[in-house]
Image (spheres, rainbow, N blue to C red):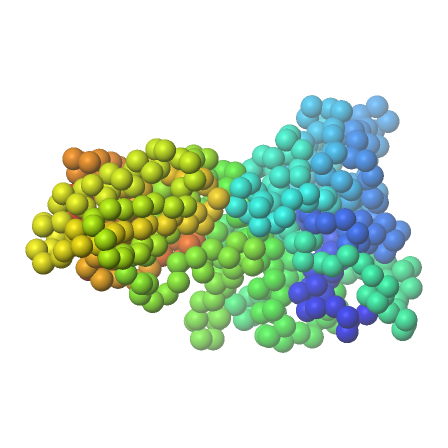
Amino acid sequence: MEPTNLENRVKWHLLARMIPFVENNYNVCELGPRGTGKSHVYKECSPNSLLVSGGQTTVANLFYNMNSRQIGLVGMWDVVAFDEVAGINFKDKDGIQIMKDYMASGSFSRGRDSIEGKASMVFIGNINHSVETLVKTSHLLAPFPEAMIDTAFLDRFHAYIPGWEIPKMRPEFFTNRFGLITDYLAEYMREMRKRSFADAIDRYFKLGNNLNQRDVIAVRRTVSGLLKLLYPNGLYDKDTVRICLIYALEVRRRIKEQLKKLGGMEFFDVHFSYIDIESLEEFFVNVPEQGGSQLIPEGLGKPGVVHLVTKGATDQPGLYRFETQMTVGNGRHTVSGLGNNTAAKESARVGFDYFKGNLNRISVSAKFSEHEYHIHAVELHNTGPSNKISLAALIAFCSILLNKSVQEQLVVLGDMTLGGVINPVEDLAGCLQLTLESGAKRVLLPMSSVSDIPTVPAELFSKFQISFFADPVDAVYKALA
């Protein structure tokens, strides 16, 4: 490849494709557009790797043939790559289960025998939708067949290479200078499988407390593989290890983010970090396509801007931003951004009517009837309009009328009735997890949800400044500080 024509991140992704050649039992998936050279690497770079085309296979072929008592592909090859993951299909019912066992430990049992293999597993596939759409509406492992969309199976991946960041191969990406002959390259990579650089991290860094044992193993193997490819002589420094570690944390976190979407709060601990042993400073590593932490910006917003986390039309928690305008008028209100959803508009009206009827409890001097109010709802996660927005609408109307901003990086949870009864939050743990990812630091939480607090992991709950409120006026006071 010609490095001068490739962006820096692309070089890292191309290197990561090579890790299965130098690391034993390394499991990686890469999903992306067609024509980016995904399968080419595993077909042409080494005679020790096998590309399984078409996806149809059997346990006897891949793992162990009980009749001939011979080990299958995982014992004969260094790398077994599956092209077109969408078509992977085992004729045997226990195929996925055995693969799960092998990917976790490098061994599996057939009959009375326990068999070991060293082959790395690679899963390649195409993404047919834009990544932005998948991040918001589904998950990035959607191309896998249904039998494989199982959190226990997907948790065994050590890395997820973002194939959509690699450009389609063009002639200028290939160099006209010297490269290594494949036979030589393949022998070097096979030799490197006998060594391990997994302890390189421990010299300079510690891993954060959100990483469980599987995450730690995955990150260590990725770092080890990258260092073997870049510094086979073992002469690397702290900065090199840091760059490899950041990349390893990112590609593992990408898997964890999808597991959280599939498995919910079981996988809430996705905030991966590492600690510099010298300075004891902790650094967090994000996944670029999630982009969550920028949704609620730092600093005070304008009056009338309120963020709410609640379940939308898709029954998934989503983040909504309300932007309010006030003009000279006669006490009417209009709503936009909710489409034709009558229930959502009705919920906004409940907030407005309560605002109109109880304004004297909030401010004696505010002149309600001299203005007209317009509230616009922005869905930030494509979860569809929500019909639980009355409390957030009330706070937005009060904020614009009193010309006071809500507290910095605050998210409102909960909903109310016209009589002022506060409804508890549905799926409190899921809403708080989304709140954290969106960049919020403060949460307005109804007292009616106190009994659900034990369902929230303590570590997640401790990330916020929580303000409890008992009635809508109390919520307005606390939101506007």
Q: Is residue 450 visible?
A: no
The residue positioned 52% from the left and 54% from the top of the image is 290
365 is higher (above) or lower (below) than 203: above
Q: Residue at x 63, y 72 (%)?
A: 240
Residue 469 picture location, percent across and down? 18, 47
| Quadrant in which the N terminus appears | bottom right
**Image quadrant containing the C terminus:** bottom left
Occupied quadrant, residue 187: bottom right
- Pick whichever, 90 or 313, lies toward us: 313
| Front residue of this view, candidates 143 and 241 | 143
Q: Residue at x 47, y 55 (%)?
A: 292
Front residue of 165/97: it is 165
The residue furthest front is 329
294 w.r.t. 389: above or below: below
Q: Residue 220 falls in which quadrant of the image?
A: bottom right
Quick check: 95 left or right of 370?
right
- Let me know if residue 254 appears in the view: yes
Q: How many marks?
A: 0
Give percent across and percent down for residue 34: 76, 49
Nearest the viewer among 317 and 78 is: 317
The residue positioned 66% from the left and 39% from the top of the image is 143
Q: Percent from the top left, x then y, of residue 175? A: 86, 69
At which x and y percent is residue 341?
Answer: 40, 35
